[in-house]
Image (tube, rainbow, N blue to C red):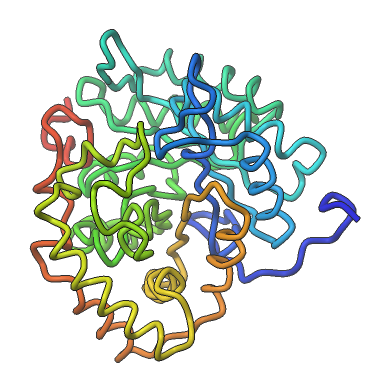
Amino acid sequence: MTGSDMTPPQRPTRTLGHGLVVSAQGLGCMGMSGTVGRPLAGIYGPVDERESIATIRCALDLGITLLDTADIYGLGENERLVGRAIAGRRDEVVLATKCGIMFGGEGGRSVDGRPEHIRTSIDGSLTRLRVDHVDLYYLHRVDPEVPIEESVGALADLVSAGKVRHIGLSEAGAATLRRAAAVHPISALQTEWSLWTRDIEKDILPTARSLGIGIVAFSPLGRGVLTGSISRREDFADGDIRVRDPRFAAGAFDAHHAVVDGLTRLANARGVTASQLALAWLLGQGNDVVPIPGTKRASYVASNASASAIVLTRDELDELGSLVPDELASVVPYLIPGNPRRGFEEGQPA
């Protein structure tokens, strides 16, 4: 019996923002596909399309509904991959994609939040995904040259046109969220959040919650650190983009080891894996939080999904949170100059 012949099991669900019901965990698809001209080379090392499609279908079989992609991943190849994987199973999927990041010459990256770009981008995504609408459409990065009201207005127009059900922002700051929500309800903020990356907690998280915006947490396993599988730079495969992240500089690994050792100790005491415990910590931060761990292997999807059944006490949540010192818990000091991330609201045109 194939996955499409089975009724997916009931998994815990959460409601993002304004009525978007999703599985308590989603699946990040970014690392599954290669790029144009390099079909076997993904951003986290080698990829296998058949295995990637099997991974997505395994997630659906397990009752994981939220699939996350973007038009920039693989320059459209990732959306095409997801489209092939969900063929015949659209009614099982809460489909999320993004627009607004562009690659230019010599590998440069820019943002484009102009309404005309947003309107064009959705049509390309729908074609590649082989669907007539997406359930959640994000502005991938805030464009510092375009008032957020204009970008969100264009996204709202797509809702009216039936091409999009809910809209979201990715890596937006607190002031931007307030301005955006004044134009149209924002269902989700996608942002990096894990035990290892906590800088949203001071201002962005409370602002999102005050506006009824759900949190979709990418890299919930610390880009692999919290799995215990990355202990030195040599563990990265050729082409893995993490080698360019200063948080993975050779001298940083001693600090990572202390965190992972503590996480592994607590996981062993609970009879679970370090990855499962790290996901359970994030799930325990509130019913408006949905992690989207990314993987290229079906076995990891099944293991990660089991974290939804782990219930942690307040003391356990606090103990886990204390494993990561403040200087390791913020991504902000490590941002690469010119790399569009949160915080652009200070430069947003009025």
Left or right? Give the position of 146 relative to 299: left
Left or right? Give the position of 58 relative to 149: right
Question: At x 42% / y 68%, what residue is drawn?
Answer: 275
* 162 lies above or below 268: above
Q: Quadrant of residue 11?
A: bottom right
Task: Please state which of residues 166 and 11 is positioned toward the viewer in this rendering.
Answer: 11
Task: Please state which of residues 173 and 338 is positioned toward the viewer in this rendering.
Answer: 338
User: Which quadrant of the rendered structure holds the N terminus?
Assistant: bottom right
* 267 lies above or below 18: below
Q: Quadrant of residue 89?
A: top right
Residue 155 percent across, percent down from the top left: 47, 30
* 268 lies above or below 341: below
Residue 74 percent across, percent down from the top left: 47, 25
User: Is there any visible trace of residue 213 in the rendered image?
Assistant: no
Question: At x 35% / y 31%, what residue is drawn?
Answer: 239
Question: At x 47% / y 54%, what residue is drawn?
Answer: 292
* 170 lies above or below 125: below
- Residue found at the far top of this picture: 105
